[in-house]
Image (cartoon, coloured by chain):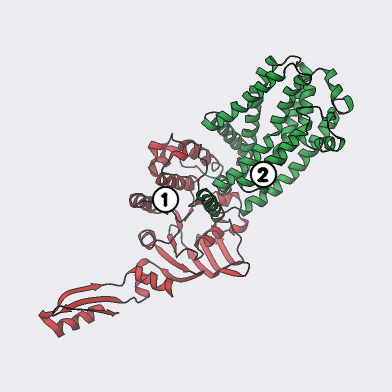
């Protein structure tokens, strides 16, 4: 249990760094700022009030991508090997990563949510809404972060990480964030409902929008049971898969592997 | 013995990179694996670190097989690699303190301030790791390697890319670790000068075999290198290679007496020995 505390401290240090470091600070505020600008222009449209909660859900689901990217970066620069060379270092590393990525997501959520509530009318949170927001968020993180870790272990280079972004954008497009899923052809509607992104968006809408808004959703319902079911399945799959894949990846790390990777990336940079 | 390697073999597919390598290290000894690039030094050290699985042979490090060693074993071993660029956003002192905290269940880690002073980084404690110069970064890597007070320290090509001054400071640090703290050190290098400066014992590894082992003096003596004698008589220069230069020079004096000029004897050096071994 001591190692959990060490990992927790590690996560807090990384989180603090991400708010005191120029480039990362920009990404913390630029994206939310653009989101808020978009929200401002959408505020009087039909689906406008649904966009804020949907975006919150999407941002939270994107923790998957940052987990995956950070894992790849940490493998390239030797952070993972360092963890492997330290007693219980891998556990500490992973706990730290989960804490820093989740913490960073929560911070971004607040950065969008508070001004968003002021800009967009028709969004209210009552006690039950807060409760929904919290469980959807927590379950969503448990569903997406292990999957992110798996993606980060399987796709080894920064380049491959760039490629992951493409299908991810596709999933966002069909996840009911920017227009109701019911407006899509049936087969796309089905694919959309396989992703955790859709369910996290739906959960957020159910927390923040009045009940009448459920009319445009699939089955005219917030489908809390299904939300918990699908996110739960992703969580179980991720938690089963992640330790196996991570262990396999970590076993392959050694000094010469990291050195080779560095030489390769240097050669690419020179060309 | 802190470390015993017996009949170690490593194969990648059809290619055999280590053939029956055997050696051992006593507690507090500084052992150097010397050899050209591609000789199998890194493979050997990675097997001992528990980062790579061997094909055959017996390996025991601190009483355990590194292939199935646990976290307690991990806490007794320090590792310094050449290609670390990790934790660039962390501050130097903060990183040392954090990594030290992993060791507290096993032993008292080095206090950050003391450790920074030992590696000469006190001034840089508040700096971000990526702002350090190459030499400072390497010293930080060594500090991280020893933060848990390891009984055995692995150093893989520790001074690659150092300027002469940084190299000398680094050598002093390694010497101090062995003398004052009794740390057993295994280091790899392709730099002969470094090996002879640091090592209690040198193992020369070429093409996956240990071709010679011993103290720097033993190695030079054991492999009878030929001294070179140069002289001139009547303005004409001569040179001759011989295993017994003293006797040869005595002969020169009795033959030429006062006519002998510009006499020069170059003793077989460790470098000649090494080059002869690696070439064959």
Mark 1 vs mark 2: in front: 2
Report if residue B278 is visible in the image: yes
The quadrant in which the N terminus of chain A is found is top right
Which hue belongs to chain A? green
The reply to whether the C-beta atoms of the residues labelled 1 and 2 are less than 8 Å apart is no
Residue behind mark 1: B181
Read off the chain for label 2. Answer: A
- A68, above or below B209, in the image: above
Which hue belongs to chain B? red
**Residue A125 drawn at (x, y percent):** 75, 17
**Residue A17 drawn at (x, y percent):** 54, 32
**What kind of element bears circle 2?**
helix
Residue behind mark 2: A163
- How far apart in space, not on screen, are marks 1 and 2 (Cα)? 50 Å
**Residue A129 drawn at (x, y percent):** 77, 20
Label 1: few (<14), some (14–19) or many (≥20) C-alpha neighbours in 10 Å: few
- The quadrant in which residue A255 appears is bottom right
Judged left or right of residue A175, residue B250 is left
- B138, above or below A174, in the image: below
Q: Nearer the viewer, residue B167 or A31?
A: A31
């Amino acid at each position: 249990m001591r190692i959990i505390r060490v990992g927790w401290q590690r996560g807090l240090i990384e989180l603090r760094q991400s708010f005191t470091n120029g480039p990362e600070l920009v990404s913390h505020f630029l994206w939310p700022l653009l989101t808020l600008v978009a929200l401002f222009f959408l505020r009087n449209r039909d689906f406008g009030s649904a966009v804020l909660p949907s975006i919150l859900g999407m941002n939270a689901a994107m923790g998957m991508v940052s987990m995956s990217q950070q894992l790849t970066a940490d493998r390239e620069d030797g952070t993972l090997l360092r963890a492997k060379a330290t007693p219980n270092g891998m556990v500490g590393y992973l706990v730290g990563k989960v804490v820093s990525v989740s913490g960073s997501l929560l911070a971004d959520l607040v950065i969008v949510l508070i001004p968003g509530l002021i800009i967009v009318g028709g969004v209210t949170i009552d006690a039950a809404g807060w409760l929904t927001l919290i469980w959807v968020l927590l379950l969503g993180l448990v569903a997406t972060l292990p999957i992110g870790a798996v993606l980060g272990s399987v796709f080894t280079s920064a380049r491959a990480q760039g490629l992951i972004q493409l299908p991810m954008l596709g999933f966002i497009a069909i996840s009911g964030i920017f227009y109701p899923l019911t407006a899509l052809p049936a087969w796309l509607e089905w694919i959309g409902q396989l992703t955790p992104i859709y369910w996290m968006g739906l959960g957020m809408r159910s927390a923040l929008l009045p009940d009448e808004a459920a009319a445009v959703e699939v089955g005219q319902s917030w489908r809390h049971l299904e939300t918990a079911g699908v996110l739960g399945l992703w969580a179980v799959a991720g938690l089963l898969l992640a330790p196996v894949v991570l262990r396999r990846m970590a076993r392959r790390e050694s000094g010469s592997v990291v050195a080779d990777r560095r030489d390769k990336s240097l050669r690419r940079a020179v060309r | 013995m802190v470390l015993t390697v017996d009949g170690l073999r490593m194969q990648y597919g059809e290619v055999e990179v280590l053939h029956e390598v055997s050696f051992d290290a006593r507690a507090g000894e500084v052992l150097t694996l010397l050899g050209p690039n591609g000789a199998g030094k890194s493979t050997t050290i990675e097997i001992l670190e528990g980062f790579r699985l061997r094909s055959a042979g017996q390996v025991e490090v601190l009483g355990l097989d590194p292939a199935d060693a646990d976290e307690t074993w991990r806490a007794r071993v320090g590792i310094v690699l050449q290609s670390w660029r990790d934790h660039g956003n962390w501050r130097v002192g903060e990183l040392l303190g954090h990594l030290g905290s992993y060791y507290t269940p096993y032993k008292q880690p080095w206090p950050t301030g003391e450790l920074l002073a030992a590696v000469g980084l006190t001034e840089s404690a508040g700096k971000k790791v990526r702002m350090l110069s190459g030499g400072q970064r390497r010293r930080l890597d060594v500090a991280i390697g020893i933060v848990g007070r390891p009984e055995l320290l692995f150093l893989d090509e520790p001074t690659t890319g150092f300027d002469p001054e940084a190299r000398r400071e680094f050598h002093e640090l390694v010497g101090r670790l062995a003398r004052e703290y009794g740390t057993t050190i295994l280091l790899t290098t392709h730099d002969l000068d470094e090996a002879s400066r640091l090592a209690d014992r040198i193992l020369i590894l070429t093409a996956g075999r240990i071709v010679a082992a011993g103290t720097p003096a033993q190695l030079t003596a054991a492999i009878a290198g030929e001294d070179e004698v140069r002289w001139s008589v009547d303005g004409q220069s001569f040179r001759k290679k011989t295993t017994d230069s003293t006797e040869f020079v005595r002969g020169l004096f009795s033959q030429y007496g006062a006519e002998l000029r510009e006499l020069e004897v170059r003793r077989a050096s460790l470098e000649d020995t090494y080059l002869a071994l690696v070439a064959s």
